[in-house]
Amino acid sequence: MNFTIFQQINGWAGHSRLLDTIMITLSDSLPYIAVAIILYLWFVGNKQQGIEKRYTAIYAVFSSAIALCINAIIHFVYYHPRPFVTHHVHQLVPHTVDSSFVSDHAVLVFAIAWTFIMRNDRFKYPILIWAIVVGLSRIYVGVHYPADVIGSALLSFATSGIVTLFSMKLEPLVQLVFRLYNQLIKLKQLLPKH
């Protein structure tokens, strides 16, 4: 069933240059968009809203980091070949022949999306849709199975839930991040202006 669903999604690849370009762009631009979202959360909003947005940014980073570390362990102990290794597929982007399960890309987008949902951010649904589309793009371009993306979504849901559940325990670390940021701002103000 995993491969059957993969074939149905990946089967669209190679038939429309426009759709291929959109999916490749979605798949490849993920790190830049993720960083842009975190920076947006950190630097926009009024004073009260800004603090809440910064908490969302920090929790999203924490959740992503934990999920990616767990994923590294999964890759270390369990190898599942990528679709293009064991089958003839429409592979639109180059990729190393490492373990397919679970997807780093999907882990990152879903960690951000679940954090938005758990923090009840007003952009939670657009971010969730973006995460789903990025997950689909990884299947479309031929580098992941549907189970890889679903596994990523579940892993990120768990890490986002843990970060949210233990947010009070994380408060000293969050305050440290705020203090470091404020020190950087003060240092920048002390630097001579050209």
Image: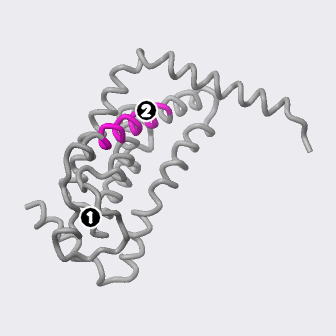
Determine which residue is flagged by label 2.
62
| Residue 64 is covered by the magenta coloring | yes
Of callouts 2 and 1, the N-terminal one: 2
- Give the secondary structure at mark 2: helix
- Give the secondary structure at mark 1: helix
52 sits to left or right of 96: right
**Residue 49 location in percent, x, y?**
56, 30
Residue that appears at 18% across and 66% down: 6
Q: Which residues are magenta?
A: 58-72
Residue that appears at 50% across and 20% down: 173
Image-quadrant location for residue 62: top left
| Residue 130 is covered by the magenta coloring | no
Image-quadrant location for residue 67: top left
**Residue 65 location in percent, x, y?**
41, 37
- Mark 1 burial class by Cα count in 10 Å: few <14, some 14-19, many 20+: many
Q: Nearer the viewer, residue 178 or 66?
A: 66
- Figure check: 142 above or below 68: below
45 sits to left or right of 20: right
**Residue type of the residue flagged with mark 2:** Phe
- Mark 2 burial class by Cα count in 10 Å: few <14, some 14-19, many 20+: many
**Residue 148 location in percent, x, y?**
22, 53
Q: Nearer the viewer, residue 12 or 145?
A: 145
Determine which residue is flagged by label 1.
139
- Figure check: 151 above or below 87: above
Furthest-left residue in view?
1
**Residue 116 location in percent, x, y?**
40, 38
